[in-house]
Amino acid sequence: MSKLDAVDLDLLRALSADPRATVVALAEKLGLSRNTVQARMSRLERGGVFLSFERTLSAEALGFPIEAFLQVTVRQAELPAIREELAKVPEVLQAHGLSGQVDLLVRVACRDTQHLFDTDARILAIEGVERTETSLVMGEVIGYRVGPLMQLAREEI
């Protein structure tokens, strides 16, 4: 993706404020033509700017109120197979590869602490997983956001 310009960032800011906005509404808000907005949206999508179009659902609303982060240490040579096995664990919401002493940070959602214990045991049983350390999520302090980054990027133009 080429560098974002001021119009791209304004469009992204408007979308961030109202993710359900139509192309026509965005065009009106930004003072652009519908075709310009549509073309830019297509270019941004092709460039990988949009991570996902799925709605984010509450694990708690689905009956899984306990969330935890598992710091997972693995045998590096077995990481591809471990990734495949982690993807089969329905309680795994996300997994990130890390640098440093911990290899993976895995976010899970469970019904209760026994379910968390069992989920951790299933992850530990994956061939190549050496150890885990579990931290319960007590609450989200800052949710995923890119608004401040968009503002910073806009200031740098």
Image (spheres, rainbow, N blue to C red):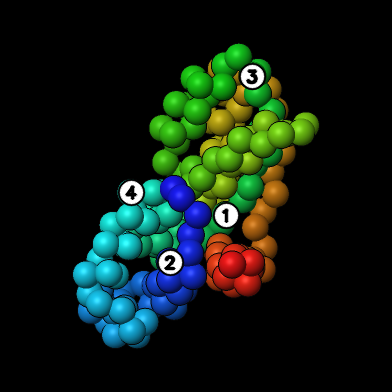
Image coords of residue 129 (percent x, y): 62, 23
Task: Of the two numbered discs 1 and 2 on the same chain, state the one appearing first in sequence.
Answer: 2
Residue 133 lies left or right of residue 17; in this view the side is right
Q: Is residue 154 above or below residue 94?
A: below
Type of the residue with mark 4:
Arg
Q: CA distance from mark 2 to mark 3?
A: 39 Å
| Mark 1 or 2: the one toward you | 2
Whole-Å distance between the Cαs marked 4 and 1?
33 Å
Disc number placed over residue 8 in the picture, else none: 2
Label number found at residue 76: 3
Near-viewer residue (88 or 10): 10
Amino acid type, mark 2:
Asp
Who is closer to the viewer here, 100 or 61?
Answer: 100
Tell me the residue at 48%/64% (across/down): 5
Q: Depth-wise, is mark 3 or mark 1 nearer the camera? A: 3
In three-dimensional space, the C-alpha distance between marks 4 and 3, rounded to whole angstroms, equals 32 Å
Where residue 37 is drawn, which disc sits there? none
Cα gap from disc 1 to disc 2, whole angstroms: 35 Å
Q: Nearer the viewer, mark 2 or mark 3?
A: 2
Answer yes or no: do the residues labelled 1 and 2 have beta carbons within 8 Å? no
| Percent position of residue 15, x then y | 39, 72
Whether tag 2 and tag 3 are in contact, CB under 8 A, the answer is no
Q: Earlier in the sequence, mark 2 or mark 4?
A: 2
Q: Is residue 98 left or right of residue 96?
A: right
Where does the image place residue 124, in percent across and percent down from the top left? 61, 27
- Residue 106: x %, y % from top left: 58, 41
**Secondary structure at numbered mark 2:** helix
Front label number (2 vs 4): 2
Name the residue tied to disc 1: 67
Dot in front, 4 or 3: 4
Give the mark nearest the N terminus, 2 or 3.
2
Residue located at (67% from left, 53% from top)? 136
